[in-house]
Amino acid sequence: MKLVLGCDNYIYRCDGAFYAKASDKAFYDRYLRVFDALRIVARTRTASAEEVARYVRLDDARTEVWPVYFFRGPKQYLPKALRVRHDMRGAADGCGACIVRLPSITGSNLLAEVRRKGIPYAVEIVDDAHDEMTGTRNPLYKAIWLLIHHDLLRACRHAAGIACVTESYLQQRYGNPDPACFKSHYSSIALDQAFYAAPRERRHGAEFAICHVAHPIAGRRKGQEELIRAARIVADRGYAVRLRFAGEGPMVPVFEELARELGVSDRVEFVGFLDRRGLRRLLDESDAMVFPTHAEGLPRVVIEAMATGLPVISTRVSGIPELLEPDMMLTPGDTQGFARRIVALIDDDELYRRASAHNFRNSLKYESTLLQARRDEFYRRLRSRAEK
């Protein structure tokens, strides 16, 4: 049986071949543990040989790509909405089941095609559209996220199965009361035993190294601005901190300019896109992760940091309270609060030790073999439903 998958990943085409991030390739392979073949419906663009050199080729004969017009964000999508819908025609032909990862403009467009053909589908909910709506001050984005929120509710009402990345939070927002609808929860993170480290002790070096990970860096909702402003406050209190931001995107120059305006450009570094090895090195070299996000599902970068024993300061949004201790979370936008928590981690070795131990212990729930067992069962139930 062939599964058609709708997701927000990017795929790159070069000389007739398709390429993706290594982590995305591993992600696609999970579906092939249960289904015989996979069709990926995703935004695709042509790339140079130099650009795809950092990606991996999708060369499994069981995997095919259905290219969709490449856009970034609602502003680029809206003028091309008809083009994207046109690209969806035939995307589900020959497929027996569908999974869409929502919220996703690509996934929602695929779902319209799947419903017309009567193909059974399941949804994997990876973000809270309602939190995205309430977390933005932009009226256009607020309206767009409201529409996405209602689209997600509708998708769940007719789904054969629903899986959320959270244990309980998203389930309270998005569900299906039909007892025939099967449900599960699992993150898309892939934490094998080799990635785990151990709880940490506070290192007393010349600088306190803070990391932040987000890719792409295309907006303000991941809290880079708040972290840079917090660094200014912390520096004014006499503490030496260094911020390292991983990821790339159009907002990098904006945040670099903010750092210059605040006089902390010598303490702020954007290190670009990191592969798995580079990410692990960044986490190992850091003393803490600070992630002032405004909206999430269950951020895997936070879980990855926890697995290396890093203390993490973040916000009380979506599924994050399932990960961190209460005193390590603040309200989005609370720059002063983030500065105070950073100073507390620097000054209080016991607080640092406790946060590290809690995070490492909690991260063990996301070890890959535990999550994969739940994923496999969810996919098997969808396949069984489709075969009836």
Image (spheres, helix red, strand yellow):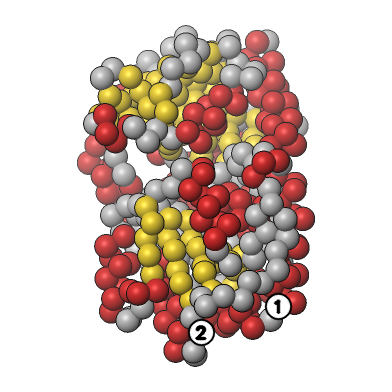
Asked if one can make out residue 235 in the rendered structure from this viewpoint, the answer is: yes
Most distant residue in the front direction: 205
Q: Position of residue 327 (x, y in %)?
A: 68, 74
Task: Name the residue type under label 1.
Answer: Asp
Residue drawn at x 46%, y 43% is 275
Q: Is residue 186 above or below residue 316?
A: above
Determine whether the residue tagged by mark 2 lies in a helix, strand or loop. Answer: loop
- Circle 1 crowding by C-alpha within 10 Å: few under 14, some 14–19, many from 20: some
> Residue flagged by tag 2: what amino acid is it?
Tyr
Question: Eyeballing the image, is 178 above or below 216?
Answer: above
Q: Position of residue 336 (x, y in %)?
A: 51, 83
Instruction: Name the residue that disc number 1 marks.
Output: 349
The residue under the point 70% across, 40% down is: 193
Q: Is residue 297 visible?
A: no
> In the picture provided, is 180 more to the left or to the right than 3?
right
Q: Quarter of the image containing the N terminus?
A: top right
Give the mark, 2 or 1, whose residue is nearer the N terminus: 2
